[in-house]
Amino acid sequence: MLQRARGRLLRIWLRLFITCRVMKIGFSALMEHLVYEILQKLLHRFHWIVPGYIMGGEKRSKEKSRLRKGISILIATPGRLLDHLKNTTAFLYSNLRWIIFDEADRILELGFGKDIEEILDLLGSRKKGHGDQENTVLTHSKIQRQNLLLSATLNEKVNHLAKMSLDNPVMIGLDGKKMEPISTIKRLDSSESDEDSEDKYSSKVPTVGDYKVPIQLIQRYMKVPCGSRLPVLLSILKHLFEREPSQKVVLFFSTCDAVDFHYSLLSEFQFSSYPQTEGVRQVFLGCKTFRLHGNMQQEDRRTSFQAFKTEKSALLLSTDVSARGLDFPKVRCIIQYDSPGEATEYVHRVGRTARLGERGESLLFLQPVEIDYLQDLEKHGVSLTEYPVLKVLDSFPLQKNHTKKSVFLESHPWVLCLQKALEAFIMSKPEMDEHARKAFCSWVRAYTAHRGELKRIL
């Protein structure tokens, strides 16, 4: 098992593709296609090594044609891989030497556990003694096959997958510490129960403690009442792009509906800082805006991803589909409009900035009742300082009859002015009103996904 680190996948490919045939399994079609593009660049001089991919959203007939011609390194998502293993007779994998499970923890979180078990059965890589005997098809083949689990976090589900698929596993850390082998997974017999074996195995796996973030990353939070969140968000975005026009920002939401609503709003909302001036209307943000979430068509996701990568100044609205595995160059700021829940997800989100030694900034929106979430982050070694949001709001021009500064965010003249304009804009467009209702309902439903300890906070 390998803990993730920047550039480690590239090092693995450089070691593997000249000596073996590889199958790499990941959770995201967008991420797998990105890996495929990198492989094409690495292998362009090695014409005898053929990379290929199979994933949801592609035509099965085209994928079958690729498999029939022969693929040396296969990039796949679990569902589509399982489909071809069952139904594509031209899919030959007898020379398979390596199976790589990238982002193993995320694969299992998304419910692909059963698919992975079936894949291991069909490939003959599932360990004997794990599960029903009739489903265990590991053969005494002369082919030596090695499985790799790459995971950012080690939890019970990852341990279960490791127990099922790895023999004599070794923990490989990337923090410079001496590598030590962890527990050998023994075949269960009548004298040893599943629970006893699981306890012995789990006891050898290191637990996750403090999380490490780049020292050049500035982490801040802001306490914003629920009714003022939207005008404050727009104000912060406007301030960031006016302060530094040539930058890229990623804005995280908890649901796809929330992404769609805010994308439509930021694309169409026009507002003038001086309402008394007739005819002065302009788009609120002067940068290009993109969106990315799991309900988009794969081609649309890929187009949005590539467009955001190439822009010098842009805003990306996204769910957690962008929090893992995707590399956006030159991202200066991460804004988490909806709380991520688990501390691991917070770290993954902010990991999109401050990469390769560059400076970065992260902003976390919290409601007053959610402020205890900071204590949960501090348990994992993550500390945030408060963002001077009132100072930012005071920097915007006010109407003539609102020159006095407010000490309360919800009664700040700029917030009230912007809030009124936003309400009028949304109510004037029936489609925007419907988007807003869907976004709110999905935002409320998202709270049920938090674990019990966090529900009292978030």
Image (cartoon, rainbow, N blue to C red):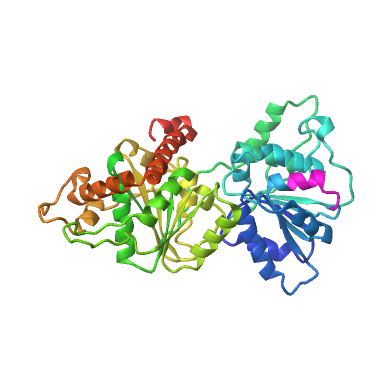
- At a point 22% along the width and 46% down the height, the residue shown is 409
Q: Residue 452's x, y, as percent?
A: 46, 29
| Nearer to me, 62 or 208 | 62
Q: Residue 297's x, y, as percent?
A: 58, 51
Q: Quadrant of residue 244?
A: bottom left
Q: Main secondary structure of the magenta part?
A: helix
- At a point 75% along the width and 26% down the height, the residue shown is 192
Relative placement, left or right, of 66 versus 335 is right
Q: Residue 222's x, y, as percent?
A: 31, 47
Write down the region rendered in magenta.
Answer: 81-90
Q: How many marks?
A: 0
Tell me if residue 452 comes above or below residue 429 in the rendering. Answer: above
Relative placement, left or right, of 107 versus 383 is right
| Nearer to me, 154 or 262 | 262
Q: Residue 109's x, y, as percent?
A: 59, 40
| Nearer to me, 172 or 132 | 132
The quadrant the C terminus occupies is top left
Q: Quadrant of residue 392?
A: bottom left
